[in-house]
Image (cartoon, helix red, strand yellow):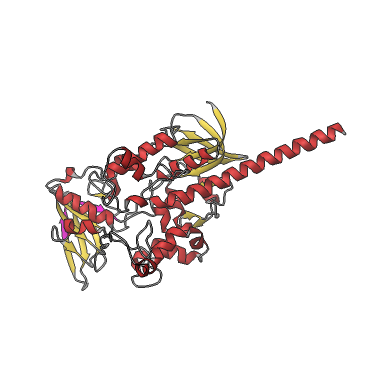
């Protein structure tokens, strides 16, 4: 078994992992990056979907700022201005970005990560073991799928998370209940309906929030001040979250947790930043196309005769029953370090956490020196922007800058020590 020393290992080759690697490469930091490039985008998100974010908010982090989605679309003669970004277009762009800026991605899984005296030890699915001084964990949404406890006991043939379906036409002719009120739930329901499934949308909230269609043309100064534009949407709170992750970092911990985890539950309060909502162009594909049960909560579910029986409460607290062939939980993601299968128990026990996610320094470094986390893993620290593609640039810049600075300091210390030794020898 061969062991190799290297300065940095990046685990994950999705948007945050590839963006971090692109910045490391621009700073001449030696690294290896492991993972299947854009795996979730290529194989798990439903074919036919469109990104919620607009084109200018859907770039990966290029250190030079040239290889944007707009640049790619222009080069490939694809629609961009005023067009929704399709999954196919974004995936082509993201894979092209990776191949151009980070061609050294190794399509191999990390099966174990543990700490050792001077760094970390990784085991790959090939059997190779690697020693690294620093590690960046950028696994994205993998292993973070959240399913409510009341559904979790259903067998796999009756229950799935919305992230599991690349092709929804397998549900043609079947009865499906979709749970949720965010973009994923609404678009999954629309695609199922268009694939000729019989769909019921079950929504806990009393209403569905729909984004207004974007205003084209020049906005007045008052409009821009009142609702500034940001990659996350229009509005002062969203602009602040997108523009000032470090300001969010310095908020009290409980407020940060509430904003990221329970923002959708506190309508009308200062904590609500970005609750579940749907893009304006989805509304006509959902409303009037299927039953939508608003204000309904699930009390109990059970498997019965190869079907799902859901006991739900309506807004008045009255019970009713729903029967379906399958339930799709479009209930979002919650990061938990214990769900990462490659982390050793020792590492997990040594990590200081905010809820179940790592507590990080301003440079995304965890309580274990040399171990960094980015993407959704860093949302409790830097805010909801870390759930979006537009968060890749801030995270990649901070992490790569910290690692590069540490390496330069280390080399400088070694040079100083050598010079001092030579001086002592000469004297």
Q: Residue furthest right?
A: 427
Q: Is residue 80 magenta?
A: no
Picture coordinates of residue 45, whole percent (x, y): 29, 45
Q: Is residue 325 magenta?
A: yes
Vertical comparison of 386 with 123: above or below: below
Residue in the picture at 17% in, 46% down: 171
Residue in the picture at 51% in, 48% down: 397
Q: Quadrant of the C terminus?
A: top right
Q: Nearer the viewer, residue 62 or 35?
A: 62
Vertical comparison of 385 with 116: above or below: below
417 on left or right of 281: right
Picture coordinates of residue 210, whole percent (x, y): 25, 63
Q: Work out whether residue 343 can be spotted.
A: no
8 on left or right of 48: right
157 on left or right of 116: left
Picture coordinates of residue 187, whole percent (x, y): 23, 53
Q: Work out whether residue 326 can be spotted.
A: yes
Residue in the picture at 75% in, 38% down: 417
379 on left or right of 289: right
Q: Main secondary structure of the magenta part?
A: strand
Picture coordinates of residue 345, whole percent (x, y): 50, 46
Magenta stretch in the rendered image:
322-330
């Amino acid at each position: 078994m061969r062991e190799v020393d290297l300065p940095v290992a990046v685990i994950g080759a999705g948007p945050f992992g590839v963006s971090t690697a692109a910045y490391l490469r621009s700073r001449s930091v030696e690294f290896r990056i492991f993972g299947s490039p854009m795996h979730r985008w290529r194989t798990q998100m439903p074919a036919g979907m469109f990104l919620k974010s607009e084109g200018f908010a859907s770039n990966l982090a290029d250190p030079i700022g040239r290889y944007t989605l707009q640049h790619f679309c222009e080069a490939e003669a694809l629609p961009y201005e005023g067009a929704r970004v399709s999954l196919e277009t974004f995936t082509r762009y993201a894979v092209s970005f990776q191949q151009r800026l980070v061609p050294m991605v190794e399509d191999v899984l990390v099966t174990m990560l543990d700490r050792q005296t001077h760094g970390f030890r990784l085991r790959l699915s090939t059997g190779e073991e690697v020693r690294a001084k620093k590690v960046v964990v950028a696994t994205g949404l993998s292993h973070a799928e959240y399913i409510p406890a009341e559904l979790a006991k259903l067998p796999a043939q009756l229950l799935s998370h919305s992230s599991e379906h690349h092709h929804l036409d397998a549900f043609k002719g079947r009865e499906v209940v979709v749970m949720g009120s965010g973009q994923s739930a609404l678009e999954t329901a629309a695609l199922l309906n268009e694939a000729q499934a019989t769909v019921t949308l079950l929504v806990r909230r009393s209403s569905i929030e729909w984004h207004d269609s974007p205003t084209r043309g020049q906005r007045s100064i008052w409009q821009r001040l009142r609702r500034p534009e940001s990659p996350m949407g229009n509005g002062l709170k969203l602009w602040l979250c997108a523009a000032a992750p470090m300001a969010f970092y310095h908020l009290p911990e409980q407020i940060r947790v509430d904003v990221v985890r329970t923002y959708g539950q506190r309508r009308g309060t200062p904590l609500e930043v970005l609750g579940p909502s749907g893009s304006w162009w989805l509304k006509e594909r959902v409303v009037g196309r299927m039953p939508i049960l608003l204000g309904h909560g699930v009390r109990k579910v059970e498997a019965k005769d190869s079907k799902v029986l859901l006991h739900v409460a309506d807004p008045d607290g009255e019970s009713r029953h729903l029967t379906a062939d399958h339930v799709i939980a479009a209930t979002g993601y919650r990061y938990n370090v214990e769900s990462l299968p490659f982390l050793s128990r020792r590492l997990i026990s040594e990590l200081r956490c905010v809820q179940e996610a790592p507590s990080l320094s301003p440079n995304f470094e965890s309580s274990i020196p040399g171990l960094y986390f980015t993407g959704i893993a860093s949302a409790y620290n830097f805010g909801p922007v870390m759930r979006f593609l537009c968060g890749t640039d801030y995270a990649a810049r901070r992490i790569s800058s910290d690692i590069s600075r540490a390496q330069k300091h280390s080399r400088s210390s070694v040079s100083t020590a050598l010079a001092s030794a030579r001086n002592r020898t000469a004297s």
